[in-house]
Structures are given as structure tokens and as C-alpha cells.
Image (cartoon, coloured by chain):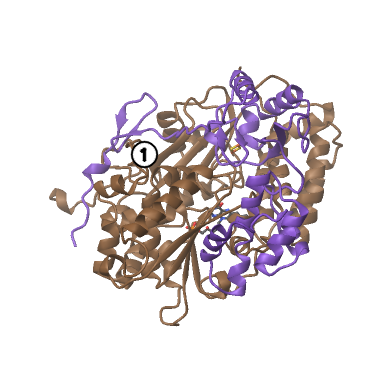
Chain colours: A brown, B purple
Amino acid sequence: MPDTLIPPKPITSALDSRFKPSLYARVGIPNSFSLESYQAGGGYQALRRAFAIGNDAVIDEMKKSGLRGRGGAGFPTGLKWSFMPLKDGKQHYVICNADESEPGSFKDRYLMTEDPHQMLEGMIIAGFAMRASMGYIYIRGEYVLAAERVWAAIHDARVAGLLGKNILGSGFDFDLQVHRGAGAYICGEETALMNSLEGLRANPRLKPPFPAQAGIYGLPTTINNVESFCAATQIIRYGWEWYSSMGTEKSKGNKLFQISGPVQRPGVFELPLGATFREMIFDFAGGPLEPIKAIIPGGSSTPMMPWTDTVLDAPMDYESITAQGSMLGTGGLILIPQNYCIVNATWNLVRFYAHESCGKCTPCREGIGGWMVKMYEKLVRGQGKPGDVELILDMSDNIGGKSFCALADACLGPVLSSIKLFRSEYDYLIANGKSQYGGSSRWAD
Amino acid sequence: MLYFTDKQTQLADIFSRYPHTEQGRRSALMPLLREVQNALGHVPEENIAEIAALIGSTATEVKSVMSFYSTYHTTPTGKWHLQVCATLSCAIAGSDELWDYLVDELGIGAGEVTPDGLFSIQKVECLGSCGTAPMIQVSDVGFSECITRRKMRTQLEQLRAGANYLPDTVVPVFIQDGQQLNALEQKIGGKYSELEPLKF
Ligand SMILES: Cc1cc2nc3c(=O)[nH]c(=O)nc-3n(C[C@H](O)[C@H](O)[C@H](O)COP(=O)(O)O)c2cc1C
Ligand code: FES
């Protein structure tokens, strides 16, 4: 059979010379964040191509690319864009979710500080495809530099005619604004974010109606993650065929994976979906600095996985990680060291979710914000009693799937997985009043 | 004292970001709160009422929104408000000890201000800098990252001596000329510039 008839093997490793990083490709270039630098590298050509092929073709290409939302839930982006009403005559909004607050996640931050125009271009393309005239970028309040760079980028784009009326002579009008958060994890949930933008307490809203029907100010709205918009720019520039040549059958494209915890080189790496944990942790992050017992694969809400060869050799894509009992989430890996008490690690995250519970629904407010965090405080203080773990499991059963939004379920990720994998540590702590680990200093001189 | 009386252009700029409707006016709440807090270190009672009037709401509602977020303060903070990330990746890197060090060194607890008015401290949740743990946020200025004991000590000394605070800008991304670097710092995989843009 001639070479051209053999379907090429999909790209599932960043070590493969056919894999070309795109999302972070411009990091490290002097003034990579400036419009001048962005355009010198071919920036805003994707937008010109979008105008040339038309809005429906953009949505069609987004669907074909197989891109799934990179904010955690993995909903197909092209499909989401196609939910927007096309001819309702109302104002439509595009929102960029730059709240990035899931512990273990820090990829969007550098997309904004190092290459903000890539995100703006994706948003303008999205606005064009979905007949929107206005977009907001909701940036978590603590990202000061990111907000400054995005603001400056918007300003420069306006001056260059890339935002505003009749963009590049296309007849399309679109503008962007930045809205800064103020320190509340729940604002990352899309409907809570809309309430926050409207100056209300950021409680999530009931769905339906979905944002595409009634979002910000009651008008049709589509919200995507920063990385999703950046991927859109690359897809429209290099084509859905290029994009879907990376990844596995159902998880297409490339993704930014983050790693924190005791590894030689913590940071963000760009890998095709389907690359293994081993490649990420060893080839790119240089391997752990001390023995590890658990991997949180995709941000704090995704269930812990054991440090085993089976897990290390598992591909990082939506389906494979689900098959291993966890989730791809935001792709934020956290490595938990062997000598760090797992009950203490879990308590840390339970405390996080308890602190961030918005108080709207009872299972989360009382269950996570009240009972769960108290149970864990009691355990880590060494005051646990036999039966406490069973009580936690029973409570979890009453919380799981019963809360208004996914925050309470997110908290159960670390709780249930740590009990399942490390039950003996809970039992030891309860029997002895102190953990078999801990006490040693972890802060570097 | 009213804050916005002599800042009409700034006010107009903030309101112009949102629709000129009742709902749109209310969207200005968070940026207005931030303005006051950045200038005064907290949002005093009378400015809460001032902001409520500006957005067509009530002081009670503004307070209800403020209490939802960890950033807004109703009582004064120090000139340098040190916010220590206490979440898992930072905890594994020693943020508990970092917190204890600050409490000892500054002689204050959460919500207190040093007698010279220079410092206040607060524990906060993951700041999106887990790759450079442990870390703190300083006021609304920026992050100090990869904090060691020595680095924290030096930074406090400098701030006490009246130096201006310079945030870190570590970017833990390992890429050169559009090609990634593996853990041995060797270029690996393909290069961005090898991609062919579609013709149109
Ligand atoms: C509690 C909670 C927090 C969330 N935080 C974020 C976040 O910080 N950033 C984000 O992009 N999505 C976050 N999401 C997901 C959003 O609700 C939404 O699915 C996402 O922004 C859609 O964009 P995407 O399809 O491009 O991923 C969160 C969801 C929940 C339930
Ligand atoms: S855990 Fe501290 S910045 Fe994420």
C-alpha cells in the first residue's frame, strides 16, 4: 500500500516530532504580549480567515476539530457555539472565563500574561461566529498582571481596528471589556460568574434556562475558558484537520497540563491529549523529588489516583482518566508525597471547598461547609473515633448529586478517593491520635 | 469622606464598560469597591453608602455582596497586606510554616495590623500559582513566588526599610523558539513555525 493511503498514526506524545506546540508557542519571545509581536508572528490572520469563510463555516470547523471545553467539564465547544440563537435580533454576549481558581490550575494565567492577543483573537472569532456584539473577560481578582496585560491588549486592538465598529472592514462590530473578580472560587461556575458580573452575590443560577437562552442581563450568552478561546484561534488558523490529528479517538487536540507538588520542574507543559502521566511527570517535569503516593490528575476536585505503573502509563485523555476512576478536569496535576498525611491533605481541600461554598443550597452549606469540614478538623486534631470514616461516607452519600451546583460534588472527589485508596491512614490516625506522617519541616530555607 | 466626588472621569470610565441600563449600572459595583479599597486599604461605611447610591442600590445589598468575597475589607489593612496561600500545593511546600513565621515575626494574627501600620496578614485560598509554591499575594500589587525562609526575611526587611514592593514574574513554561524543552533542557518534539497556516 502506498504511504499516502496508510492513515497516519494520531499524535499522542509531545516527544513526537510531529507534535508542534501552539498555545504557548510564543512564550519567551521578547514582548510576546504586545500587538506588534503578535502580528509579526502571523497574529490576527485567523480572524481574517474567519471573516473570509463566514460565521457558519467557523462553527462547522469548530465542531469538526473535536475541541472540548478546557475549563474542566469538557463540553464540545463547536456544539456549544451552535446553541446560540442565530436570528433572534437580540444582543448576544461572549464571556471568557478567566477565573481559574481550581487548586492545581495555573495555565490560563500565563496565556493572559504572555500572549493575551491569542485569547482576544479567539473571542472575536467566537463573537463573529455567534453574532455577538460584546464580550467580557472575567479575570480573577488576584491576577493583577494578567488583567493589566489584557487591558493593554484590548486598547491596542481597538486602536488597530481589531475591536470596535466594522472590524477590518468586515462589517462586524464587536468590543471587549475586562471585569475583575474579588476572590471567590464559585465565580468560576458559569452562572455564578454571570451573577458576579451583574454585581450580585455570586450564587449559581438554576439551569435551564441555559446561558445560550438567557445569560448575562438575560440575553443569549456563551461562556468558554481562556484556553478554549486560544485553541479556537489556532484551529481557525491551522485547520480542524491539523487539530484533530492530535489526541485520541474521542479526545482531540492538545492541552496545557500543569504540575505542582514536589517535582524537579513544576510548571505548565503543552501535550497532545493521550500523552501518558509518565511522559508529563518524568520527561517534562523531571520526576519527583521524594517518594509520591498519590496523583490528583486534573485540579483538586478530581479523585486521587494511586502512584502505580498502571496509572503512570495511562494516557491523559478524557476517557482514559475516567476509566481509571478520575477525571481530566483542568489538567492540573498535584503530586502528594508519601510522607504527607493523606487525611491532612484531604482536610486541606475540604477546608477549601467549605470556605468556598456559597451557602445557597443545604447539602453544600451544611454538608460541606458544616459537617464535612468539622469531621476533618476533628480527625486531623487526633480526636477521631471509630465509625467516623463510616459517618463521612454516609454524609457523602447524602451530599453527592444532591447539591445545586457541582461544588459539593467537587469536594467529594478528594474525600471519597482518599478513603478508598488510603483507608489505613485514616484508621491509623484514629487509633493513635496522630498521623504516621508529618511533623517534619517542608518549608525550604 | 466621599471618594468619587472629584473623580467623575474615572466614574464615567467604569460605567461605560457596562450597558446603560439599571442592571448594567449595578455591574459597576465590583470595580467601584476595588477603587476605594485600593486607595484606602478598606471600604469604610460611608463609602459603602456612596457606592450604593451610585449604582442605585442599598448599603445592605452592597455589604451582602462584599461579604461574599475574600478581597473586600470593612476594617483597615496594613500598607502591605500579605495574603498567604494555604491550599494544598502551597501547604505541601511549607505554607503552614510560612504563616507561622509571619505571625511570629510580625507579632500579629489574621485580621490585625502591625502597630506601625505597615503589615497585615490573611490566609487565602489557591491563587493560581501552584507551580511556584509557596507563595503570597501582596496587597493588590502582585505575587511573591517560590518563597524560602531567607527570601521572606529579606522581603520584610526591605519593606520595613521603605522599599517599594516588586512582584515576581516567574513563568514556569519551558519553551524556546516555539519548541518545548524536556527535563534535560533539550529541545524536543516539533516546532510551532513548522505549522502551515491555511490559505484563504
Ligand atoms: C464550582 C465550579 C468552578 C468552576 N471554575 C471554573 C474556572 O475557574 N474556570 C473555568 O474556565 N471554568 C470553571 N468552571 C466550569 C464553568 O462552569 C464552565 O463549564 C466553563 O467555563 C465552560 O468553558 P469551556 O466549555 O470552555 O470549558 C467551574 C465550574 C464549577 C462547577
Ligand atoms: S495552592 Fe497555592 S497557589 Fe495554588
Tell me: B23 left or right of A96. Answer: right
Quarter of image, ligand 1: bottom right
Quarter holding the C terminus of chain B is: bottom left
In the image, residue B34 above or below residue B183:
below
Residue A244 appears in the rendering: no
Ligand 2 within 8 angstroms of badge 1 C-beta:
no
For the image, the number of numbered tags is 1
The residue labelled by disc 1 is A27
Instruction: Measuring from the top left, give residue A350's x and y in whole percent.
Output: 71, 44
Say which residue appears at 42% left-offset and 70% top-offset: A133
Instruction: Measuring from the top left, give residue A242's x and y in whole percent.
Output: 27, 53
Tell me: A41 left or right of A372. Answer: left
Q: Nearer the viewer, residue A342 or B19?
A: B19
To which quarter of the image does residue B176 belong? Answer: top left
In the image, residue A72 above or below residue B109:
below
Amino acid type, residue under disc 1 in the picture:
Val
Say which residue appears at 49% left-offset and 31% top-offset: A266
The numbered mark 1 sits on a residue in which chain?
A
